Image: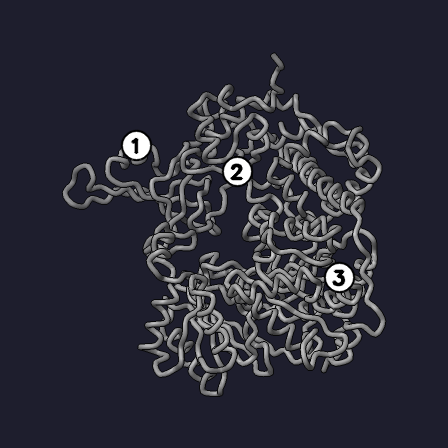
Amino acid sequence: MERVPALDEPLKKSLGPATAKVMAEALDLHTVGDLLHHYPRRYAERGELTTLADLPLDEHVTVVAQVADARVHTFNGSKGRGQRLEVTITDGSGRLQLVFFGKGVHKPHHDLLPGTRAMFAGKVSLFNRRLQLAHPSYELLRGDSEEAVDVWAGALIPIYPATTKLESWKIAKAVDAVLPSAVDAVDPLPDALREGRGLAELPDALRLIHRPRTKADIATARERLKWDEAFVLQVALARRRHADTQLPAVARRPAPDGILDAFDAKLPFTLTEGQQKVSKEIFDDLATEHPMHRLLQGEVGSGKTMVALRAMLAVVDSGGQAAMLAPTEVLAQQHHRSVTEMMGELAEGGMLGGAERATKVVLLTGSMGTAARRQALLDLVTGEAGLVIGTHALIEDKVRFHDLGLVVVDEQHRFGVEQRDALRGKGKQPPHLLVMTATPIPRTVAMTVFGDLETSVLDQLPAGRSPIASHVVPAADKPHFLARAWERVREEVGKGHQAYVVCPRIGDEEDQKKKSRPSAADDGEKRPPLAVLDVAEKLGAGPLAGLRIAVLHGRMHPDDKDDVMRRFAAGELDVLVATTVIEVGVNVPNATAMVIMDADRFGVSQLHQLRGRVGRGSAPGLCLLVSEMPEATPARQRLGAVAATLDGFELSRIDLEQRREGDVLGQAQSGVRSSLRVLTVIDDEEVIAAAREEATALVLSDPDLTAHPGLRTALDALLDKDREEYLEKG
């Protein structure tokens, strides 16, 4: 029987079935290798106390601190459940309350005497507007006891990412049990690269990261392990790019005096420098005989749609067809409306009054009537329609194209990989691909998440866009600020403008069931997030009485949604109370104010996207971020950051720093546990850029990695089936 490599050994064998089960369920760790790559989040030092000031609400944390005070409070009589132990711990800079109830009081009361130092692990909650840990686990740190010396050998105590069921110190003991297996770790880095950059060998790096004696040990280990993560991922992306260059595609060059020239001639404005530069990059790609794979990122309102439309018209000029995929029906309909308006008679191919060089622009969505759908499908298969705009309905088997030359995907992160792949398969040869996003992505993230795409950035706003003022409204601390917010909405409507009110949820029965679990941003009372239907009713009966208010959310019938959007765009409504369905692409220049309720429940990028819906005309925009979170919480600091800048790239940096990379790389990791544990895409730009260069050179000389079996193994481990498919499908 073949021997299982040491690092592939199931944890059940080393740690026993009970511990292995918890590790698998709570931390997704299954093998010895998984556990060895579960690195400490940080290290506590014996002589130094960790900072309590910045504890994240609702997260499981481990802190090393000293007991300052411990008191038992009695209520409901004096026995059993009528006791509460309150312990105050300090780290010299901050204090934190621990509480124990009922029968759980006795042991900590005996252990946690003032002056005692210990590690405490638990979930941070808010009670009476103060942070606390309820019933935390703890491990006393007695420097003189033999057991403590054995368990915490060395001066640095590793603090592991942990869970309620598995404290950091239990993970440390498990790591001790498997650490000897590190000697069998297969090195993914080619020797020449490792030696050339002076990096430690992998077994040494694993030993040093888990059991460092000094801070220099940690630095040595992290430098080496960062390279592993950056290099293996960049090799995967480099192989993807290399494979793309081997694919055939039809070169698409615009015909002189064709539809593109006619379109440019009728534009009432000049393209910005940025639009011209990016258009050139795209046209150069389209003229090559392998498929373009380009990411176009630009701030909300920077004119991405115009750039994409010109690329689509260039493809129509060359005899091909272009498809634009939008994530929602509302957005597909809106794109279709704005494209046909911009093109005018050029969008009336085959119709009376259509221009000589015109083409047909068809819309294809799931909710279309049978007759309209049949006609759209016919126009696509005959080639009558040069442009098609639609939702994922475009991907269905029935949809056939005459000659699909370009696919434009709007808001890529909302589309499944399989969907993009299916649409790509509809060309006679792979079509060119342009991916657009209004979420600004820092360069390092682009290199890591979208490393198989070339990137173009539109960072100039077209002339005529108005500034947006943003303010945080602390509804709990200062209720009169919220009253003033509604007055401001009335003032805007009084000037002939319109407003959005955004809420985190819809508020119907189905929604209630979904949301019964409290969210991470909940405050002490765990009240459910505010809902569109409730808020609209209260506003209509209260502060916004007399205004024309309507609701918009994702579970409305598509016709009703379209009707509400049409009425709002036409100025027949004053206030639209909506979910984030308006986040992307909704364009109503007369809307100048936005109030975001429970703003702390949205991510930084999402708030920035939402805010981009106002200030789209000549009047200045106003965005009010309403929150009940206390001032000192990270959630409020996040809102402060959004209010302080309109620079999407700066905000995406803040977002990334706060959310940790695992979430951001969810796209590239296909939703599975992030492969990045020590590499931080914000801080390690140099490592990522160098790894990309090294990876590109290596793949060029050895695309199949025949000379690098260790790297091949690491790649297989990184690219489990899901991730491999993600990269294969681009």
Query: Which residue is identified by label 2?
Result: 44
Q: Residue furthest left?
A: 77
Residue 232 coordinates in the image, percent (x, y): 70, 38
Secondary structure beneath disc 1?
helix
On the picture, is 147 further left or further right than 178? left
Secondary structure beneath disc 2?
strand
Q: Amino acid at mark 1?
A: Lys
Contact between marks 2 and 3 (CB within 8 A): the answer is no
Q: Is residue 111 shown above or below 448?
A: above
Residue occupying image coordinates x 38% and y 52%: 514
Secondary structure beneath disc 3?
loop
Residue 320 is marked as: 3
Residue 440 coordinates in the image, percent (x, y): 64, 61
Q: Residue furthest bottom?
A: 495
- Using a 10 Å C-alpha cutoff, classify the residue at mark 3 as few (fewer than 14 neighbours), some (14 to 19) or many (20 or more): many
Query: Which residue is identified by label 1?
Result: 107
Residue 680 coordinates in the image, percent (x, y): 63, 46
Residue occupying image coordinates x 49% and y 64%: 581
Quadrant of the rendered structure where residue 578 is?
bottom left
On the picture, is 372 further left or further right than 290? left
Q: Is residue 715 shown above or below 97?
A: above
Q: Is residue 617 shown above or below 370?
A: below
Label 3 vs 1, first from the N-terminus: 1
**Mark 2 and mark 1: span between their CA atoms?**
25 Å
Label 2 vs 1, first from the N-terminus: 2
